[in-house]
Amino acid sequence: MAQIELEGINRVFTLGDSEVHALCEVALSIEAGEYVAVMGPSGSGKSTLLNLLGLLDRPNSGHYRLEGRDVTTLSADEQAAVRSARIGFVFQSFHLVPRLTAVENVALPLMLAGVSASERGARVSQALKDFGLASRAHHRPEELSGGQRQRVAIARATIMRPALLLADEPTGNLDRATGQEVTALLEDLNAAGMTLIVVTHDPSMGARARRRLLMEDGFIRQDVRKPASPSLAADQPQTAP
Amino acid sequence: MSPADTLRFATRAALGYPLRTALMVLAMSIGVAAVVMLTALGDGARRYVVEEFSALGANLLIVLPGRNETGGVNPGSFVSSTPRDLTTSDAAALLRLALVQRVAPLAVGNSEISFGGRLREVMVVGTSADYVDIRGFGVASGQFLPPEDFGRASAVAVIGETIRAELFGNQNAIGRMIRLGDRRLRVIGVMSPAGRGLGMNSDELVLVPVATAQAMFNTNSLFRIMIETRGRDALVPAQAQVEALLRARRDGELDFTVITQDAVLGTFDRILSALTLGVAGIAAISLAVAGILVMNVMLVAVTQRTGEIGLLKALGASARAIRLAFLTEAALLSLAGALSGFVLGHAGAWVIRLVFPALPAWPPSWAVIAAVGTALVTGLLFGVMPARRAANLDPVQALMKR
Ligand SMILES: Nc1ncnc2c1ncn2[C@@H]1O[C@H](COP(=O)(O)OP(=O)(O)OP(=O)(O)O)[C@@H](O)[C@H]1O
Ligand SMILES: [Mg+2]
């Protein structure tokens, strides 16, 4: 049984009279621990797919089984519980709460899950240390660099030790070097066993993934796997920058 | 999300937008402060009047000339229109009643007092020896009017403290001859300062025997007769006795009114309580306005923090958790507003007391509780809609908004 199984997924947006098929008959199966890059032109439905996988959105038709359970029929609060326990999100624009410090931002998922304050403290400071943010713990997002912000966001996304990490253009707002750091960070998490699904426009980043989905007009046009090790992929960029 | 965390989160959220929070709290506190201050003023006025009447002394009956048809008290009770005069012989007759302890006839008028070239206008009260006890006044030096027949026009006077200070300064006033109108009278006593009651300040009065005053003003009638009964229980039977006696003395005609202090007091109490309630109601409208403001502010907060709400949802927050967080924030804002309004209102009442020391401007506790309670309830009530809106936001849409 695959971790993620999509079957005949359709997502249609109606804008006035016109209908936009953001996802058309998407069928997909992703194993636990996979590293998947979702690529494709703007408007091809990448974000829509990711939102669906993250239970932020519901398909108009089709079935989504997450870890064997059909999650499309769950109530909003049941879906929230699944998100809390199993899914981590990383966004292009970081989505840190501006008035909260790095520690408080990272602690948010634990707080929402009702973890006690004392346990939170220990877990959050460990996480910040792991991500090299110990010295920035009590800074607010505006006092952090873009790379640091995204690292705080990743720390927050993984603090609940989710099985599935979803990242929508996580390096889109970062310069190349910082983007690579963040990518490496995400890959480390994947190496530790977390399923990683990244939406990206950056071909070199996409090339590092062991599996690539190419989307176009709501269809998955290509589903490419490569057996090579990640280090090899990094050494041999298949696309010019 | 635990309640403590919800509270902490909401507090941080409220403090995260200091200007918005401050304005909100200010609006709410003005509403609460208005209720507290206006009721303090209203209730202060009520208490002032009650105290004024209480200063008259207990067990008091007042006989007014003229009939008051309803038997209650209306403004007419205080305007003496005299169909048949009340006289000193009426007063003397009343003194013989079993339940009557003291009787003070009152004849009142204005005149000029002069001593050693100093001259001023004064209010002259013609009365009897019992007056000082009925009113609970004190005599600072000398003696009060001597107990004597109501018909005797002795040439003596007791003066108020202000009059004494103005006419005599540092000199001794007792035994001096003053001129009051066209009469020469001997000062036999000075009243203790600051005895007050029913709008008459004893400091500015000249008290003379009732017959002296009547002669001076060339009249036989009395302004009113004050009667002190033997004990509180005797008040109602004494009222009947007084009525029966006076009626018999004027061929069965009821052209006078006997009122008890309670009746007067009760009426004023009712009028001023209603007034206080009225101003409280008007001030409470500002609380409703503040409630609507809470709603607006919270709606703005929801719009402002749409991205954050989307994020919280992505992080696994249930709709309930988000609803509670926003509701708690609204409650906190109203609580802060109510508390600062409470403090502000009390400070205002304190200033009123400072400026008008005579007015016991303390806000009644019902008003304070009602104001704070209304603030909290409206804040919460008007917080429900924005909180629900936040909880029902679509996470994808919310996350797209920056
Ligand atoms: N809420 C919405 N209402 C209407 N149309 C929408 C909505 N969300 C997405 N769409 C449409 O669905 C299509 C797919 O959108 P999606 O955001 O998934 O694209 P994308 O591949 O992520 O693009 P980009 O690379 O620009 O982020 C687009 O045509 C978009 O206009
Ligand atoms: Mg997108």
Image (spheres, rainbow, N blue to C red):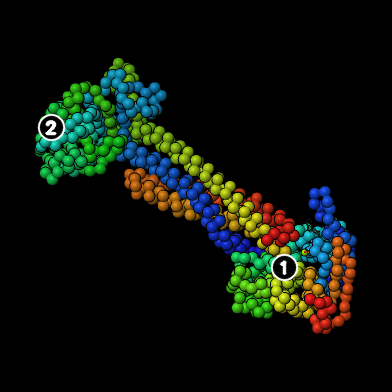
The image quadrant of residue A173 is bottom right
Tell me the quadrant of the picture where the C terminus of chain B can be found. bottom right
- The amino acid type found where label 2 is placed reads Arg
Mark 2 nearby-residue class (10 Å; few <14, some 14–19, many ≥20): some
* Marked residue chain, label 2: B
Q: CA distance from mark 1 to mark 2?
A: 100 Å
Where B266 falls versus A78 (above or below)?
Answer: above
Most extreme residue toward the top, as rendered?
Answer: B251
Q: Position of residue B127 (x, y in %)?
A: 21, 31
Q: Position of residue B45 (x, y in %)?
A: 38, 40
Indicate left or right for B238 with A95 as reference: left
The image quadrant of residue B9 is bottom right
Q: Name the residue at 41% across, 52% down.
A: B347
- Where's ligand 1: which quadrant? bottom right
- The amino acid type found where label 1 is placed reads Gln
Does the closest atom of ligand 2 sit within 8 Å of the Cβ of label 1? yes
Nearer to me, B385 or A137: A137
- Residue A71 visible (yes or no): no
Where A186 falls versus B352 (above or below)?
Answer: below
Q: Name the residue at 15% across, 31% down.
A: B180
For mark 2, what is the residue? Answer: B179
Number of numbered labels in the structure image:
2
Task: Classify mark 1: helix, strand or loop.
Answer: loop
Is the residue at mark 1 from the same chain as the one at mark 2? Answer: no
Residue A92 is labelled as 1
Q: Position of residue B185 (x, y in %)?
A: 12, 32
